[in-house]
Image (cartoon, rainbow, N blue to C red):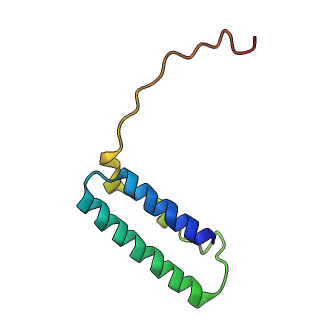
Amino acid sequence: MKKILILMMIVNTLLLAAGSETKRENRVKQQIKIEMQKEKQHAADGVFHGTDTYDFKGAEVNKDSLESVPELEPQYDFDMNNVYD
């Protein structure tokens, strides 16, 4: 159940971050293939992976999707004077 939710979060993140439809579809298909291979490997192993054997490389940000993320403007209207009143 957790893996399905994680897979859904990854796919949704890729869908939101992608700029064009073709790039988005290719990235999603590629990520689904990667996740399916991980699931098959986990099903074959049948063990829980600890920190020494877990693949942290899969949790990294996809550099192809970074170009479509907009830059955020800082909000300077925060006033700390009336916070504790």
Instruction: Give the number of callouts.
Output: 0
Residue 14 at x, y percent in the picture: 39, 58
Write the residue at 64% across / 13% down. 80
Give residue 30's quadrant in the image. bottom left
Q: Residue lying farthest right? A: 85
Is the residue 36 above or below the residue 17 in the image?
below
Horizontally, residue 68 falls left or right of residue 81, namely: left
Write the residue at 45% across / 58% down. 12
Horizontally, residue 62 falls left or right of residue 41, namely: left
Q: Between residue 36 and residue 16, name the one nearer to us.
A: 16
Q: Residue lying farthest bottom? A: 44
Q: Is residue 61 visible?
A: no
Give residue 22's quadrant in the image. bottom left
Write the residue at 44% across / 63% down. 11
The N terminus lies in quadrant: bottom right
Horizontally, residue 44 falls left or right of residue 25, namely: right
Q: Residue lying farthest front? A: 21
Give residue 53's quadrant in the image. bottom right
Residue 78 at x, y percent in the picture: 56, 17
Q: Is residue 3 visible?
A: yes
Is the residue 62 above or below the residue 68 in the image?
below
Q: Between residue 14 and residue 49, name the one nearer to us.
A: 14
Write the residue at 36% across / 44% down. 69
Residue 57 at x, y percent in the picture: 48, 65
The C terminus lies in quadrant: top right
